[in-house]
Image (cartoon, grey):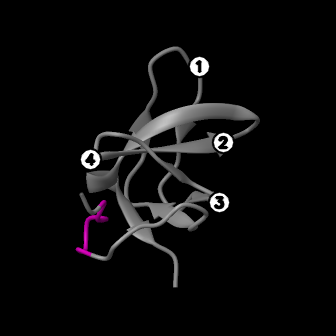
Amino acid sequence: METKDSNGNILNDGDAVIVNRSLKVKGMAATIKQGTTVKNIRLTNDPREVEGRIDKTVIVLKTEFLKKKA
């Protein structure tokens, strides 16, 4: 299974991605702002989700809201 970002680029472990739009996260008081960079992502068993660390918190992000950083 290939994990792809919102533009169709293939994502790999350790890639950096950028959040396309501001997202509310369940369990967090703050929101993730558009343009936030998430470094060193990890792929999950689901090709529509990746794990990333934001502010020392590991969260699962849907790939439809991410684009691969060039």
Residue type at the position of mark 3: Lys
Q: Position of residue 18 (x, y in %)?
A: 50, 64
Q: Which residues are magenta?
A: 3-8
Q: Label 3, on which residue? A: 39
Q: How would you rate the neighbour count of disc 4 (Cα within 10 Å): few for under 14, some for 14-19, many for 20 or more?
A: some
Above-or-below relation of 3 to 48: below
Q: How would you rate the neighbour count of disc 1 (Cα within 10 Å): few for under 14, some for 14-19, many for 20 or more?
A: few
Dot placed on the residue nearer the N-terminal end, 4 or 2: 4
Residue type at the position of mark 2: Ile
Q: Residue at x 54, y 61 (%)?
A: 13
Q: Label 4, on which residue? A: 48
Circle on res. 65: none
Front of the two marks 2 and 1:
2
Q: Residue at x 23, y 74 (%)?
A: 8
Residue type at the position of mark 1: Ala
* Label 1: which secondary element: loop
Are discs 1 and 3 less than 8 Å apart at CB?
no
Are discs 2 and 3 less than 8 Å apart at CB?
no
Front of the two marks 4 and 2:
4
Q: Position of residue 66 (x, y in %)?
A: 38, 59
Q: Label 1, on which residue? A: 29
Above-or-below relation of 66 to 23: below
Residue type at the position of mark 4: Arg
In space, the residues marked 4 and 1 are separated at their CA atoms by 24 Å
Dot placed on the residue nearer the N-terminal end, 4 or 3: 3
Front of the two marks 2 and 3:
3
Dot placed on the residue nearer the N-terminal end, 2 or 3: 3
Q: Label 2, on which residue? A: 54
